[in-house]
């Protein structure tokens, strides 16, 4: 009886947001008429520096995060200043180990679009909120501080390539992959 009451009480409590390096990630977000759940959140580090906190939102946190259909969100909060060129290069460098040469060649025009979007920022400043959303009807939409930056980038294959930076067979950081998968 006590166990049932505790279980009912636990189910009645609101879901807690995740916190990484002082950055809070909501348990749920709504985009493109879809409610997404936080799959996990983690800290991207480079050498000894904390670069950004990142959260992954998907429709089904138990399904394959890369392949599942529907809207998705990567939410990034910068923890240090990084110039846009360096940030964009780091994203592309994270894609390469997870794709063969032919796939990278096919992605080049959309990588160029992403680089152009990043260039408009000039710098990803400490505290800046950047989201990369997959919107099935529109493509990959980047927002900064909640405002769309440029046009959407077409192709779900491109968004999946972005996700493989963190979730691929060769992620940029193993413990970050585990954290984004809720581990």
Image (cartoon, rainbow, N blue to C red):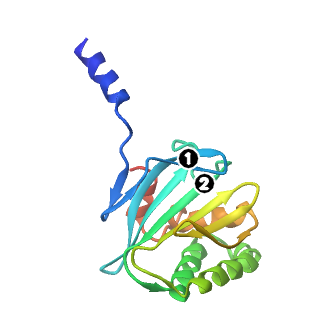
> Where residue 95 sits in the image (x, y, percent)?
59, 73
- Proximity of marks 2 and 1: CB atoms separated by less than 8 Å: yes
**What is the residue that sits farthest to the left in this orientation?**
2
**Rounded to the nearest whole Å, what is the CA distance between mark 2 and mark 1?**
7 Å
The residue tagged 2 is 72
Residue visible at 51% across and 69% down in the picture: 145
Task: Give percent across and percent down for residue 67.
Answer: 64, 52
At x 64%, y 48%, the residue is 68
The residue carrying mark 1 is 36
Is residue 58 shown above or below 138? above
- Relative to residue 172, is residue 68 depicted above or below? above
What residue is drawn where x is 34% and y is 81%? 47
- Work out whether mark 2 precedes mark 1 in sequence or the reverse, and give the earlier one: 1
Task: Quarter of the image for the N terminus: give it.
Answer: top left
The image position of residue 88, as x and y in percent, is: 57, 81
Residue 3 location in percent, x, y?
A: 26, 18
- Residue farthest along the top direction in this orientation: 1
């Amino acid at each position: 009886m006590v166990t049932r009451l505790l279980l009912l009480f636990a189910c009645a409590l609101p879901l807690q947001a995740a916190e990484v390096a002082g950055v809070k990630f909501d348990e749920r977000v709504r985009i493109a008429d879809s409610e997404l759940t936080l799959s996990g959140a983690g800290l991207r580090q480079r050498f000894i520096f904390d670069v950004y906190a990142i959260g992954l939102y998907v429709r089904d946190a138990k399904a394959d995060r890369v392949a599942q259909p529907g809207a998705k969100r990567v939410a990034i909060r910068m923890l240090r200043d990084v110039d846009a060129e360096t940030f964009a290069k780091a994203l592309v460098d994270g894609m390469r180990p997870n794709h063969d040469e032919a796939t990278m060649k096919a992605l080049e025009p959309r990588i160029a679009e992403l680089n152009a979007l990043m260039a408009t920022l000039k710098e990803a400043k400490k505290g800046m909120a950047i989201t990369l959303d997959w919107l099935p009807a529109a493509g990959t939409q980047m927002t900064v501080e909640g405002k769309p930056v440029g046009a959407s980038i077409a192709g779900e294959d491109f968004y999946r390539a972005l996700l493989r930076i963190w979730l691929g067979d060769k992620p940029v950081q193993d413990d970050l992959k585990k954290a984004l998968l809720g581990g």
